[in-house]
Image (cartoon, grey):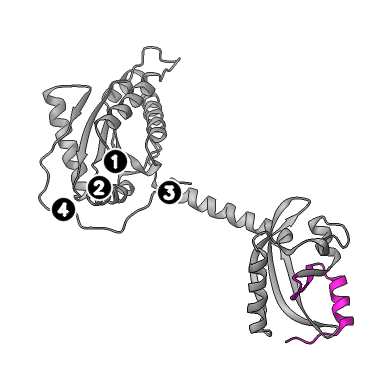
């Protein structure tokens, strides 16, 4: 246990620019707060000592404070450090790094709590993490549509197929083909075609369950994944897609129209994801050559062997 003179304790606490508090381990009440604590947190002189610890440290109820004191007492020469929040009357919750340790004050054991505000540092760290996450996500996206690149879409497709096997609920794949993109490029220019694909990608991203469930399939095709699919849910999604794409209008190109066609596949087994996409693409091409319907049901000849199980991929939902 640290032995510190009362005079030295008083001098240090009064002059310190860090937050310093004394907590009575028996009553679990603050008995002292220095001016730095009161100034930075917006409390009047002595006001903190009238607060229950939970009102200042909202992450710790009285039993949890008592448990902290008990742990501290079991190893009195070893301070406890933590990251937590303190309630500021000026700006709400503030992030603090705190250290708790036992000290002797007037022959009594008291808990000294010392710490400093790291809110700005935490905010900078959070911003950096968000920037890194955004950069990572952007590297996974197709620049033309804003959807996932196919190579990054495959693990989500594989995980969904395995989940379908376990739940015995079919998954769905919708192949969306903007069939007249070549004509748009030729008549209105490449920039117009790129704009159409980007707008279609925005529509798709808005309608799929998670952003990771849609990818650019090829030049003018995108693929949508439905984790649980039936006739009704597919019909509803197709209706929403057609309605949204039908509303796209370009004042500079009043005669520009979009001609979408779709192929739908229902699956209950797990296969190699790249192979199943290739088979679906081939079957779609054959069906389109036979009859250019707006919507065709895809039933390619599937491989006999199931895909190897992979670690499940959870979609990013923030």
- In the rendered structure, which segment of residues is drawn in magenta? 1-28
Task: Determine the CA span between mark 4 and mark 1.
Answer: 19 Å
Which residue appears at 36% of the width and 12% of the height? Answer: 255
Q: Earlier in the sequence, mark 2 or mark 3?
A: 2
Q: Residue 169 got which mark?
A: none
Q: Is residue 49 covered in magenta? A: no
Q: Which of marks 2 and 1 is nearer the N terminus?
A: 2
Task: Determine the CA span between mark 2 and mark 1.
Answer: 8 Å
Q: Identify which residue, 158 or 288, lies in the foreground.
A: 158
Q: Residue 316 got which mark?
A: 3
- From the viewer's perspective, is the residue at label 2 or at label 4 nearer? 2
Dots 2, 1 in contact, CB < 8 A: yes
Q: Earlier in the sequence, mark 4 or mark 1?
A: 1
Q: Of helix, strand and loop, which one carries label 4?
A: loop
Which quadrant of the rendered structure holds the N terminus?
Answer: bottom right
Which residue is the site of mark 4? 306
- Asked if 83 appears above or below 225 in the picture, the reply is below
Task: Determine the CA span between mark 2 and mark 4.
Answer: 13 Å
Q: Of helix, strand and loop, which one carries label 2?
A: helix
């Amino acid at each position: 246990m640290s032995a510190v003179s009362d005079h030295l304790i008083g001098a240090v606490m009064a002059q310190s620019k860090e937050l310093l508090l004394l907590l009575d381990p028996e009553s679990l009440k603050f008995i002292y707060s220095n001016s730095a604590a009161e100034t930075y947190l917006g409390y009047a002189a002595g006001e903190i000592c009238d607060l229950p610890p939970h009102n200042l440290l909202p992450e710790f109820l009285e039993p949890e404070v008592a448990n902290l004191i008990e742990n501290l007492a079991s190893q009195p020469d070893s301070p406890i450090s933590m990251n937590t929040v303190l309630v500021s009357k000026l700006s709400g919750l503030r992030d603090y790094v705190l250290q708790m340790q036992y000290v002797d004050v007037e022959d009594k054991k008291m808990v000294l709590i010392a710490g400093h505000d790291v809110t700005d540092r935490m905010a900078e760290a959070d911003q950096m993490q968000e920037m890194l996450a955004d950069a990572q996500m952007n590297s996974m996206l197709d620049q033309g549509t804003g959807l996932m690149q196919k190579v990054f879409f495959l693990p989500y497709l594989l995980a969904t197929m395995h989940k379908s096997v376990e739940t015995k609920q079919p998954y769905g794949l919708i192949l969306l083909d903007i069939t007249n993109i070549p004509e748009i490029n030729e008549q209105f220019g490449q920039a117009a075609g790129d704009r159409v694909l980007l707008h279609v990608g925005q529509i798709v991203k808005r309608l799929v369950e998670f952003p990771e469930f849609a990818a650019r399939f090829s030049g003018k095709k995108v693929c949508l994944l439905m984790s649980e699919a039936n006739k009704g849910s597919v019909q509803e999604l197709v209706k929403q897609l057609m309605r949204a794409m039908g509303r796209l209008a370009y004042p500079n190109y009043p005669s520009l129209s979009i001609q979408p066609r779709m192929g739908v596949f229902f699956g209950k087994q797990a296969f190699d994801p790249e192979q199943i996409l290739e088979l679906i693409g081939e079957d779609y091409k054959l069906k389109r050559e036979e009859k250019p319907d707006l919507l065709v049901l895809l039933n390619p000849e599937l491989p006999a062997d199931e895909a190897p199980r992979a670690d499940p991929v959870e979609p990013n939902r923030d």
